[in-house]
Image (cartoon, grey):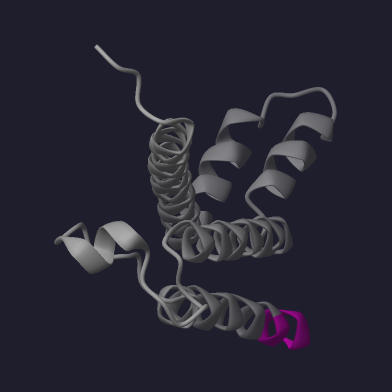
């Protein structure tokens, strides 16, 4: 039995590394999207969360715990978290585009020769709803501050 030429083995290794990178990026994207959904849920129920915090800390000797908990669900804190998640998602999208060979004008060899899973959506398509949501949150924050 003859061993494969070194270039074929290197190609196989590169393909395996590329596939592993794509899988890892898909997992990262899913985790970020789950975190965004959790943040959205918390933002939707902020008044209820604040009321529960006030009720739970009503008997505290000082207001430190209440202040810390209220800060965690405050709009500025959530806006900061949203901005951080959007930046991370943009990084993942940029890496996905590299992993799928997008942006250079050519398809990766496995996509050109056979049908493979569709590449992820372009960055502008994926982040537009997030950026719009972020703008909404900031506008509401400014409106509340002006009241």
Confirm whether the magenta stretch covers residue 143. yes
The relative height of residue 25 versus residue 86 in the rendered view (above or below) is above
Q: Position of residue 135 (x, y in %)?
A: 59, 83
The relative height of residue 39 versus residue 17 in the rendered view (above or below) is below
Give the magenta-colored segment's residue range. Answer: 142-147
Confirm whether the magenta stretch covers residue 39. no
Residue drawn at point x = 43 percent, y = 41 percent: 11
Nearest the eye: 2 or 111: 2
Q: Position of residue 140 (x, y in %)?
A: 61, 81
Residue drawn at point x = 78 percent, y = 41 percent: 67
Q: Residue furthest front?
A: 2
Q: Is residue 24 left or right of residue 63?
A: left
Nearest the eye: 58 or 67: 67
Q: Residue furthest left?
A: 115
Q: Quadrant of the N terminus?
A: top left
Principal secondary structure, stretch drawn in magenta:
helix
**Quadrant in which residue 120 is drawn:** bottom left
Q: Position of residue 125 (x, y in %)?
A: 41, 81
Nearest the eye: 73 or 83: 83
The relative height of residue 43 versus residue 24 in the rendered view (above or below) is below
**Quadrant in which residue 45 is drawn:** bottom left
Q: Is residue 111 left or right of residue 81?
A: left
The relative height of residue 12 versus residue 113 in the rendered view (above or below) is above
């Amino acid at each position: 039995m003859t061993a494969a030429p070194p270039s074929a083995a290197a190609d196989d290794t590169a393909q395996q590394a590329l596939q592993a990178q794509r899988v890892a990026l898909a997992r990262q994207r899913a985790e970020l999207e789950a975190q965004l959904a959790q943040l959205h849920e918390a933002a939707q129920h902020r008044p209820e969360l604040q009321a529960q915090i006030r009720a739970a800390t009503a008997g505290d000797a000082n207001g430190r715990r209440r202040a810390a908990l209220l800060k965690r669900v405050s709009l500025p804190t959530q806006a900061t978290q949203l901005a951080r998640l959007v930046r991370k998602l943009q990084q993942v999208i940029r890496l996905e585009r590299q992993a799928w060979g997008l942006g250079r004008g050519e398809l990766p060899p496995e996509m050109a020769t056979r049908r493979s899973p569709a590449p992820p959506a372009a960055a502008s398509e994926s982040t537009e709803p997030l950026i719009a949501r972020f703008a909404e949150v900031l506008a509401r924050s400014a409106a509340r501050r002006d009241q």
